[in-house]
Image: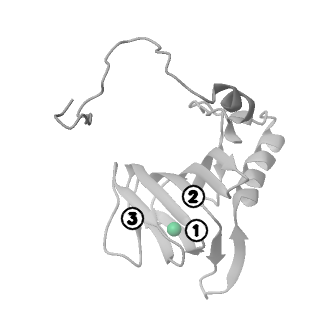
Amino acid sequence: MTMSGITKMTAPPSSAYKIVDVPEAYAEVIKRHGIPGTFVGPSERESPWVPFGPNAAIRHLLFDARHNIFSNILWMKSAGVIGTHKHRGTVVMVCLEGSARYLEYDWVAGPGDFIYETPGLVHTLVSDNANGVKLFGWLQGPLEFYDDKGNFVETIDVWWFINHYESYCREHGIPINKQLYI
Ligand SMILES: [Fe+2]
């Protein structure tokens, strides 16, 4: 504690390897209305790789229909292109493996690199890496996809992502994993 009586945390205040009860004035309200967190493990049964064109797949991790939020891992299996798209919301991405870039920018994302995208951005995702790329993404709001002439093709949002996941599960006899829905 400082002279002013204000505590400043500079390190975790406890290293006790145990569950600690903490005060909560609204525990009953949280019990009634709180939304549990989720966990999705690595197996195909928990969430399969769903093909997205001939050279890519999406592993869905979360759908939040209230806020049009969806999270997933995008896997480009070798060098290739994911078509030009426009964002109507925000995207947080971390490159997990391989590398990727946008034709419109001068950087290349490799493992551990962080990408943030904002409404109005239009860009074309490519991987020049023979091993492709895996990108973790947390996406809020719709994306519009365009063909190579700049013609609008489709807006994809949380409903598109849910349908992408569920239709593949139905076709392959994989049970719908409720952990993906918050
Ligand atoms: Fe994007």
Label 3 crowd (10 A; few <14 / some 14-19 / many >=20): some
State the CA–CA distance, disc 1 to disc 3: 26 Å
* Display coloring: one colour
Q: Give the mark nearest the N terminus, 1 or 3.
A: 1
Instruction: Give SS at disc 2.
Output: strand
Which of 127 and 11 lies nearest the eye of the viewer?
11
Q: As displayed, is residue 78 above or below residue 177?
A: below
User: Which of disc 3 and disc 2 is earlier in sequence?
Assistant: 3
Indicate which label's residue lies in the foreground, 2 or 3: 2
Q: Find numbered disc 3 in the image and state the secondary structure of the residue it sits on.
A: loop
Q: Determine whether label 1 and label 2 are within 8 Å by CB.
A: yes
Residue type highlighted by circle 1 = Gly
Q: Is residue 105 left or right of residue 4?
A: right
Question: Residue drawn 52% across and 53% down?
Answer: 137
Q: Give me the C-alpha separation between circle 1 and circle 2.
A: 7 Å
From the image, tell me which residue sits under label 3: 128
Q: Residues within 10 Å of mark 2 (few under 14, many from 20)?
A: many
Name the residue type under label 3: Asp
Residue 16, picture quadrant:
top left
